[in-house]
Image (cartoon, helix red, strand yellow):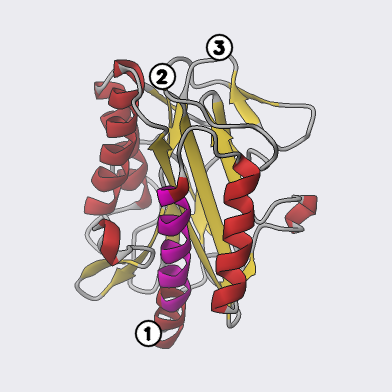
Amino acid sequence: MIIYKSDREIAKLAEAGRLTAEILDAICRLVAPGVTTKDLEQEAVRLMAERGVESAFKGYRGYPGVICTSVNEEVVHGIPGPRKLVEGDVVSLDVGIRHEGFIGDTARTVPVGEVDELKRRLLESGRRCLEAAIAVVDARHRLGDVSHAVQSTAEAAGFSVVRAFVGHGVGRDMHEEPQVRNYGKPGSGPPLARGMVFAIEPMVNAGSHEVRVLDDEWTAVTVDGQPSVHFEHTVAVTRDGHEVLTACPKTM
């Protein structure tokens, strides 16, 4: 069941979203060759404590980290650890927090130094997928239009979208209805309506859309070893169209 939020609840979600975006923006700026994913995790711990918020990820179904750090062929749910980033990597950083009972959830993939042409195009495609999807969020469209925007944008660039993981409604719980797939037909699915809040999170692979989960039971990787990118914003359907709740002024 889709839970429609009041204006007050959307304001609370926007505050959680703003704090989440600040944390994501700060750890993105630390990405550099030689930095470990654990270093990024530790900075996220510090930033969350500084803001008086808690991770929405740590402990969720047993997940051990406060953020997710997924490198190159890792699609999502990479666990922070001793792995050092090297020049030419891409790393996806996914941050979720709980603030005064409401969830903030956002993600971004960033390059480590200079990346090759394939990864540069993949990063650009992932960003465009998210932008295209957000552009159709208003009460004139259906959820399938959002999904189709992601899929058509990625495939036009010669890439594929992950089917195994989806975006989701966001509210007091991190994963609410509806599911927001990265593929779909225009004009399908539930109509978008004021009060809906959901995370759109394109996961775009350079090769096959197929993924598998490693023995750590969390990290999803591409089956062909090709790189993947992940971008995510939490968006509310409003009277005038939409509001991106996880936008950070420093990155707009």
Question: At 62% across and 73% down in the image, what residue appears?
Answer: 49
Which residues are the magenta region? Answer: 15-29
Q: Tag 2 or tag 3, which sits nearer the N-term?
A: 2
Numbered circle sitting on residue 217: none
Which image quadrant: the N terminus? bottom right
Can residue 162 be seen here? Answer: yes
Looking at the rendered structure, the kind of residue marked 3 is Asp
The alpha-carbon separation of the residues under discs 1 and 2 comes to: 39 Å
Which residue, given by chain and number where applicable, does mark 1 sit on?
A: 7
Looking at the rendered structure, the kind of residue marked 1 is Asp
Which numbered mark, 1 or 3, is in the foreground of this view? 3
Helix, strand or loop under label 3: loop
In this view of the protein, which residue sits in the foreground, 98 or 53? 53
Question: At 40% across and 75% down in the image, what residue appears?
Answer: 14
Q: Report x, y in % for residue 82.
A: 69, 36
Q: Is residue 153 above or below residue 63?
A: above
The alpha-carbon separation of the residues under discs 1 and 3 comes to: 45 Å
